[in-house]
Amino acid sequence: MCGPTGIGVLWGRRKLLEKLSPYQYGGDMILQVKDQLTTWNELPWKFEAGTPNYGDSIAFGTALDYLESLGMGRIYAYEHQLVEYARRSLEEISGVEVLATKQKDSHSGVVSFVCDEVHPHDVATYLDAEGVAIRAGHHCAQPLMTKLGLPATNRISFSFYNTKEEVDRMAKILSSALEFFRKG
């Protein structure tokens, strides 16, 4: 969300968070310590062990203000258009399979895909050499990859600053990549 890495927001139901025990200890998360009993501070401090990340918290707040000024609904609508455009572009390339539901309203700003007979890391490396950055790997979803019978996937992530021209460029380079690997 345009903020620094390593920071985010955790939302949970108060009733459940109050029942949950912390997994890290220290700082303001402890209300009282006795020989045989420790009591936790109230929420949200109960889960905030150690020194807070003040600098990144301020930067993240600024990023959220910026996104709000653009309009989260407008950002969502634009990213949705890019995702649909990218899906159509990818589906036109022979040997590319888009891994997504057909329910367009269920999409985020991400498109995952695989290419026949070309490992996702090779695809990502080829695109990277041409100045197109995508992700390749199991994306912290190894059980899903196992269930799908895939070693990894490629993933394109979009944001409000991406353009259709970038999608067109990515699709053109991806087509070149597949030609290159199929000849080899």
Image (spheres, rainbow, N blue to C red):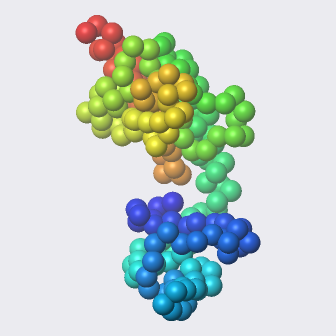
Q: Residue 86's image quarter? A: top right
Query: Where residue 162 appears, x then y in whole percent?
Result: 48, 46
Q: How many numbered discs? A: 0
**54 relative to 43 in the view: left or right:** left
Q: Residue at x 40, y 39 (%)?
A: 135
Q: Residue at the location (33% across, 20% down)?
A: 177
**Quadrant showing the C terminus:** top left
Give me the residue at 54% from left, 33% from top.
144
Residue extending farthest top? 183
Q: Position of residue 8 (x, y in %)?
A: 51, 66
Residue 74 or 43: which is nearer the viewer?
43
Q: Residue at x 51, y 45 (%)?
A: 158
Residue 180, percent from left and from top: 29, 14
Residue 89 visible, this orientation: no
Where residue 92 sits, quadrant-wise, is top right
State the image quarter where residue 18 is shown.
bottom right
Compared across the picture, whether 48 is left or right of 118 comes to right
Q: Nearer the viewer, residue 56 or 64?
A: 56
